[in-house]
Amino acid sequence: MAAEFAWGLIGPGGIAHRFAEAVHRLPGARLHAVLGRDAARAEAFAGTWSRDGVPPVRVASTLDALLDDPAVQAVYIATPHAQHGEFVRACLERGMPVLCEKPLVPTLAQAEPLVALARSGRVFLMEALWTRFLPLYAQVASWLQSGAIGEVRAIQSSFCFASDYDPANRLYNPALAGGALLDIGIYNLAMTRWVLETALGACPEPSSMRADGVLAPTGVDQRVAGTLVFPGGVVSHFVCAFDAVADNSLRVVGERGCIVVPSQFSAATDAVLQRPGEPDVRVHEPLRINGFEGEVEEAVRCVRTGLIESPHMPHAESLSLVRWMDELRGQLGVRYPFE
């Protein structure tokens, strides 16, 4: 029986608790050490996820202390977006495998050298886009690949929530790479790519991309409506926003039917196959823990088998996503101070 896989964690904030819960409840994995800017917050986080029967989660005093710990087998990074790059680079330079929250980094200019570093050093690197690992999408993939709706004609999705404007909050702060596109629109784009990859075998590059939206007073995007047109006329429409409420659905329109993920597609458990003249086919695939378990298991599998990237979330996927977001942000006139 393999020994428990020991994780280090950088950035013990809100999203990190979901990762820690998944690790805590997965057999064969444990959270070993945490690094945060605020020592008291890091101590509280470590205390929350320590458990009986194993050594308590330790708090690393410095990044070097975390990376020098011989027990740590991989690091999960969950800092604000603008800080991802510095921590990813530090880990890769030390040969430490990395699972980094989405977006991997805010710009293509930052992403390309990090991917090159991972490849040249043969160190595992994966962007933590957990939606691609949800069990529901195995059934959606089966429908797409079997031709249940015929050829894909259009993709529609929304991801919106209402958030009070606060210029210091990471959602609105340009120094922290705020903005709706990087924070939540990445899911719309990622699942557009996933649908086309699944249906066609590969996602073609768009023949055109257009973004319209509203900027917050800080200059970051608080609402984005995007249209991507692909060769053959397939169109993807999406909206993401911090100032609206939507059903956050995903709809794949085909020549003979439609696949609908009716709500919260980024964390989906339910989907419907709709075809004219036939009863709806409904499927429910519950999360085993909280949805993060799939990406954690994939990272552990890849590290243990010596892979430097996941075949389900490869480096090329992360590069394509950030390239698309660069283009759409540029159309909106959003630019970060560190660019």
Image: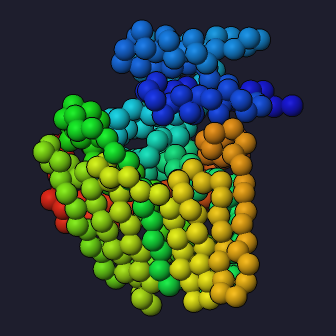
Colour setup of the view: rainbow
Q: Vertical placement of 224 versus 308: above or below?
A: below
State left or right for residue 166 relative to residue 29: left
Nearer to me, 54 or 154: 154
State left or right for residue 208 relative to residue 48: left
Residue 57 appears in the figure: yes
Q: Vertical placement of 43 versus 271: above or below?
A: above
For the N terminus, the quadrant is top right
Residue 251, percent across and down?
A: 52, 71
Q: Number of callouts in the render?
A: 0
Q: Vertical placement of 116 versus 42: above or below?
A: below
Name the residue: 18% across, 53% down: 215
Farthest residue toward the right?
Answer: 1
Nearer to me, 325 or 301: 325
Nearer to me, 131 or 272: 272
Residue 113, percent across and down?
A: 36, 50
Q: Vertical placement of 40 versus 3: above or below?
A: above
Residue 242, percent across and down?
A: 31, 48
Name the residue: 17% across, 48% down: 216
Name the residue: 59% across, 78% down: 258
State left or right for residue 114 relative to residue 58: left
Residue 323 appears in the figure: no
State left or right for residue 170 relative to residue 300: left
Name the residue: 31% across, 41% down: 163
Residue 171, percent across and down?
A: 29, 40
